[in-house]
Image (cartoon, grey):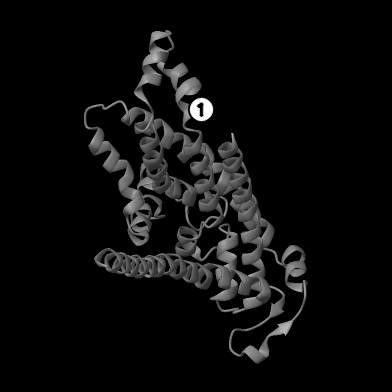
Amino acid sequence: MATGTRRRQSRRVETKRGWKDRLVIGTMIGVPTLLVFWLVWLPAAASVLLSFTRWNGFKFSAIEWVGTKNYVDITTIYPPFWPAIRHNLIWLAFLFVLPTILGMVLAVVLDRNMWGSRFYQTAFYLPVVLSLALVGFIWQLFYSTDQGLINEVFGSKVDWYGDPSVNLWAVLVATAWRHTGYIMLIYLAGLKGIDASLREAAAVDGASEVKTFFHVIFPVMRPINMIVLVIVVIESLRAFDLVWIVNKGRNGLELISALVSQNVIGEATRYGFGSALAVIMMVISSVFIAIYLRIVFREERR
């Protein structure tokens, strides 16, 4: 009798715990899913739908279906579009060539536990955590036409932010200053996680440090390289802040993200046209993300 009572009590406790566990699991899965749907998928779907309309953003009744007209106009009669595509490609190539390689080199050097390594890590990573306003102020000290350091040193009068022939490169250098520390930290974390026995085995075989890095360390860091690749691509496509501060993405600093902002929140308030630009940017991003996911899944199947 007593045994049967204990069993029934045990079943009630297990049933009660089961409901609690399911409630906790459901909450942990359901709440993030709703947030992702509300903050990511719903705006993305709304942007796709709005890209086929003409709307000034004031009344829903004013939404007019125009089909693919926005896309046709963007590629045929919208002058800033193709320069923006070219500038985004230049941005992508520049981030790959300079900050990525420089960040990797800095990570390799700082991974050798040299004297003052912590200080240099902090110094190189500091630009990443600085506010955008402060970054703009710091580079204004270099680029100012009248009292800037560069013009003072070389005795020139170059308008680094205003001249369309040089302002893109001036902003890219400022971007590289922020981006290098970020890449350095990612590669440094990857290097810290590499098994020391790999380096020891390479040293026993007589491999130099350069050969060890390129033939042993670098292939092992393939997941880190893929993460850096995706970060660089995404950073290139969503580049916006510095060009918007300089001249709102005009006069030589056209980028797709800046064009989206000009049309959606600028004086034009062309939500349909801006949404079409956003969809183009989203499609380009999706291509790189799909390539990345395909490589990751193929690696996991091996």
Please say whether residue 150 is visible from this viewpoint: yes
- Quarter of the rendering containing residue 125: top left
| Foreground of the two, 239 or 60 | 60
Q: Position of residue 258 (x, y in %)?
A: 55, 64
Q: Is residue 206 above or below residue 191?
A: above
Instruction: Identify residue for label 1.
Output: 219
Q: Please say if 173 is above or below 164.
A: above
Q: In this view of the protein, which residue sits in the foreground, 292 or 250?
A: 292
Residue 250 in view in this figure: no
Above or below residue 252? Residue 210 is above
Query: Callout 1: 10 Å neighbours few (<14), some, many (20+)?
Result: few
Q: Position of residue 207 (x, y in %)?
A: 44, 11
- Percent x, y of residue 102: 43, 35
Q: Quadrant of residue 294?
A: top right
* Residue ID at (36%, 50%): 128
- How many numbered discs, if any? 1
Q: Residue at x 77, y 67 (%)?
A: 72
x and y percentages locating residue 292 in the rendered image? 59, 45
As drawn, is 9 to the left or to the right of 88?
left
Side (left or right) of 239 relative to 138: right
Q: At label 1, which amino acid type do we have?
A: Pro
Element marked by disc 1: helix
Residue 246 lies, with reference to residue 91, above or below; the image says below
The quadrant holding residue 263 is bottom right
Say which of 27 and 240 sits in front.
27
Q: What residue is shown at x 32% (from left), y 29% (from top)?
A: 111
Quarter placement of the N terminus: bottom left
Along the line of sight, which residue is nearer the eye, 77 or 272?
272
Residue at the far front in the pictured view:
1
The quadrant in which the C terminus is found is: top right
